[in-house]
Image (cartoon, helix red, strand yellow):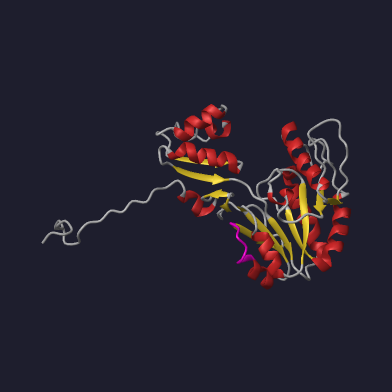
Amino acid sequence: MELLAEADLPKGTVNLVIGGVDVGRRLSESPDVDVVSFTGSHKVGAQVMRQASSTLKRVTLELGGKSPNIILPGADLSVAVPPSLLRFCLNSGQGCGCTTRTLVARQAYDEYVERSRDALGKLVVGDPRDEKTDLGPLIRAEQRDFVQGHVDRALAGGGRIEAGNPKDRQQGYFVDPMVIGGVTNDSDIAQTELFGPVGVVMPFDDVEEAIRIANTSSFGLNANIWGRTSEAIDVARRIRSGTVTINGGGGMRPDVPWGGYGFSGLGREGGEDGFLEYLETKHIQWPLDGEPTKPFGTK
């Protein structure tokens, strides 16, 4: 906000309002607010929609996901495994686009797990101010307990830790990175956005099954596919997701739209589509000969 003030923008162009639920409700319900853009959970997003509906204002919602990461048969696991893990460890898993459901061809499952154990064993969890740290804490104790609760229930239900070495930490809001196997796609841990450094890995027998599993989710924000480019593009076209990257894709791009389907929200941010969310369309029409036209239905 201080930098924006230095930019000499017209007064009122950007304002900072700090407050709790009451302030959010007032903004979303106010007839003086034309558009509400919200990033957060789908439950809060639904509440924002309800509050905005009384004034029929436009709502843009970016609400997270449970994004698939598909390892096609023949993909080079030495290339695919490390970034696959880092993609759900980003910000200690606190990222809406984290690819937390990894689908691996059954014949490559054991190798994927073995490589995952080696890669996760090298990640350092600790003080985010230490340059050696790879993963810091979660945002608060409630979030740590939420993530750990889902892990505990998954393990109690027959799941297993395929990779990772979680420690019993007495201090801080830390969750060690781990990959959970032995679960199905309809299990709670495979369908709920955890917002923590926990991924699940599931085998598939053919590409059709992988596509079906990937698309069986309430969310549809992001996806990634590893494999031969031409084959991966064919699969990407069939994935129900606002964004699909192939073989790691690239970095964050402000010139392309970001957003998803289903519980992942409404509208887009970024690129030209993101600007259009804040614009209205107007149609102006006049006769070419300069004479006023008669109303429809008259002679």
Circle count = 0
Judge from the rendering whether residue 191 lies leftward or rightward of residue 107; answer left or right. left
Q: In this view, which residue lies farthest toward the left?
A: 299
Most foreground residue, 187 or 203: 187
Question: Is residue 58 magenta-colored?
Answer: no
Quadrant of the snapshot with the C terminus: bottom left
Judge from the rendering whether residue 229 lies leftward or rightward of residue 28; answer left or right. right
Q: Which residues are magenta?
A: 236-242
> In the image, what residue occupies the spot 64% across and 50% down?
65
Most foreground residue, 251 or 3: 251
* Residue 1 on image: x %, y %: 56, 32
Q: Main secondary structure of the magenta part?
A: loop
* Residue 92 on image: x %, y %: 75, 43
> In the image, what residue occupies the spot 81% across and 66% down?
106
**Residue 203 occupies which quadrant of the picture?**
bottom right
Question: Is residue 239 magenta-colored?
Answer: yes
Taking the image as drawn, is residue 138 in sight?
no
Q: Establish if 294 lies above or below 227.
A: above
* Residue 94 on image: x %, y %: 70, 43
* Residue 16 on image: x %, y %: 53, 30
Judge from the rendering whether residue 41 lies leftward or rightward of residue 110; answer left or right. left
**Residue 166 occupies which quadrant of the picture?**
top right
Q: Establish if 231 lies above or below 88.
A: below
> In the image, what residue occupies the spot 80% across and 56% down?
82
Most foreground residue, 35 or 26: 26
> In the image, what residue occupies the spot 66% across and 58% down?
223
**Residue 79 occupies which quadrant of the picture?**
bottom right
